[in-house]
Image (cartoon, grey):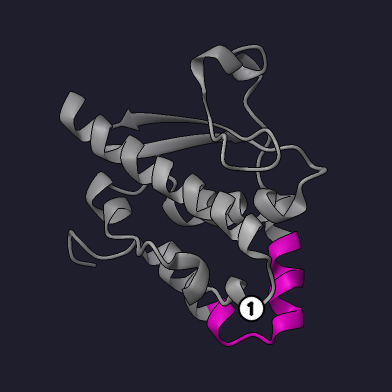
């Protein structure tokens, strides 16, 4: 993997979604929703230290930290919001512990590469794009602060 390539884990997810039917994409999105890890105990009462993604219809909170040159994300998305929780799960699995450069190489049209524009409404897609945008911005800011 080159320094400015999409993280390998995310590339694998993109290829899996690309090869799936529309119905399978929705099922996979729900699987990612179920597999998104819960916040660590120490962050349960620390939402004031997390950034809220206001464009999402559900309350979505994000925290990014730099550990040994790689970005670690913590996401809090209610289980009652399976669409955004599923996309958050994809981003968590695909971008967590990647370098900031790899995160910044993530295409802004990721939802299209996953085929989600065919199965989700534009309003939902707006929230998904906002979450990815925030994660990329966090990676950029962490690089500057290091």
Residue 49 against residue 127 in the figure, above or below: above
Q: Dividing the picture into quarters, in which one does residue 46 lie?
A: top right
Disc 1 residue crowd, few under 14, some 14–19, many 20+, Cα 10 Å: few
Residue 12, position as x, y percentages in the image: 47, 72
Magenta run includes residue 27: yes
Quadrant where the image shows the N terminus: bottom left
Magenta run includes residue 100: no
Relative placement, left or right, of 55 versus 22 is left
Is residue 54 shown to the viewer in this render?
yes
Relative placement, left or right, of 4 versus 26 is left
Relative placement, left or right, of 103 versus 144 is right
Query: Residue at position x 35%, y 45% from top?
Result: 136
Residue 96 against residue 78 in the figure, above or below: below
Residue extent of the magenta highlight: 16-30
Find the residue positioned furthest to the right.
80
Residue highlighted by disc 1 = 118
Query: Residue at position x 82%, y 43% from top?
Result: 80
Query: Residue at position x 62%, y 63% from top?
Result: 122
Residue 133, position as x, y percentages in the image: 40, 47
Q: Nearer the viewer, residue 10 or 61?
A: 61
Q: Nearer the viewer, residue 132 or 7?
A: 132
Residue 45 against residue 36 in the figure, above or below: above
Query: Residue at position x 54%, y 73% from top?
Result: 114
Q: Dividing the picture into quarters, in which one does residue 90 lie?
A: bottom right
Residue 145, position as x, y percentages in the image: 19, 24
Residue 28, position as x, y percentages in the image: 70, 69
Residue 124 against residue 130 in the figure, above or below: below
Q: Considering the numbered disc 1 on the image, is that residue within a helix, a strand or a loop?
A: helix
Find the residue positioned furthest to the front.
123
């Amino acid at each position: 993997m080159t320094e400015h390539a999409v993280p390998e884990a995310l590339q694998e997810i993109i290829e899996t979604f690309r090869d799936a039917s529309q119905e399978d994409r929705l099922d996979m999105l729900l699987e990612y929703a179920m597999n998104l890890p819960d916040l660590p105990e120490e962050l349960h009462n620390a939402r004031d230290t997390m950034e809220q993604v206001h464009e999402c219809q559900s309350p979505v909170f994000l925290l990014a930290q730099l550990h040994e040159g790689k970005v670690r994300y913590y996401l809090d998305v209610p289980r009652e919001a399976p669409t955004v929780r599923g996309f958050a799960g994809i981003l968590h699995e695909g971008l967590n512990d990647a370098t900031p450069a790899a995160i910044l190489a993530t295409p802004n049209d990721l939802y299209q590469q996953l085929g989600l524009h065919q199965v989700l409404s534009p309003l939902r897609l707006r929230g998904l794009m906002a979450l990815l945008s925030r994660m990329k911005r966090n990676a950029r800011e962490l690089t500057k602060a290091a």
